[in-house]
Amino acid sequence: MKFPTVFQEYIKALPEPKLFVTSLDRRIARIYPLAEWRVNEKLFDEYLDDPDDAANIAFNAQDLGAETEMDGQGRIGFSPELRRELKLEDAPVHLWAYKGHIEVLSEEIYQQRRQQASTANADAVKKLQRAGLR
């Protein structure tokens, strides 16, 4: 998958070129800098509130995930299993950088997320402004 220039520049600026491409929920692909992914792996190992949840999410990540690097043309490889599972083959996708990773949403998931976000109301905006939103 070829990435827009702004995402290519973000990835090129990372201290380590390796990435981990996966899905935690089998709906949305996530591209993590490998250092960020290692933080998640540590969390899976140490999460005590619900070890079964951690194990299931870690399983999804490993089942669909792979280490990769961006090539010289700004492309990042996704495993065939990940592309099929998330319906990303030969289809438009939407990218969203969020909390240290890039999310890759199929058109269907993007529209669902868009509908969900459109219900944000003025009270929610005010709450976030009080918390420091600019």
Image (cartoon, rainbow, N blue to C red):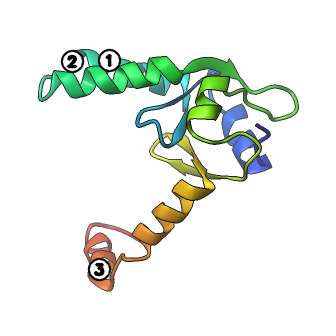
What numbered label is drawn on residue 95?
none
Q: For the view shown, which residue lies furthest in the bottom direction?
A: 122
Residue 48: image location, x then y, percent = 13, 23
Q: CA distance from mark 1 to mark 3?
A: 35 Å
Mark 3 = which residue?
126
Residue 75: image location, x then y, percent = 79, 33
Q: Quarter of the image containing the C terminus?
A: bottom left
- Quarter where residue 81 is shown: top right
Residue at x 41%, y 25% (from the top left corner): 60
Mark 1 = which residue?
42
Residue type for callout 3: Lys
What numbered label is drawn on residue 46?
2
Residue 34: image location, x then y, percent = 54, 21
Q: For the view shown, which residue lies furthest in the left direction?
A: 49
Circles 2, 1 touching at the beta carbon (< 8 Å): yes
Callout 1 crowding tier (Cα within 10 Å): few <14, some 14–19, many ≥20:
few
Callout 3 crowding tier (Cα within 10 Å): few <14, some 14–19, many ≥20:
few
Callout 2 crowding tier (Cα within 10 Å): few <14, some 14–19, many ≥20:
few
Q: CA distance from mark 2 to mark 3?
A: 35 Å
The reply to whether residue 17 is visible in this rendering is no
Left or right of 37 in this view: 57? left
Left or right of 112 in this view: 94? right
Circles 2, 3 touching at the beta carbon (< 8 Å): no
Left or right of 67 in this view: 57? left
Q: Secondary structure at mark 1?
A: helix
Q: CA distance from mark 2 to mark 1?
A: 6 Å
Q: Secondary structure at mark 3?
A: helix
Q: Secondary structure at mark 2?
A: helix
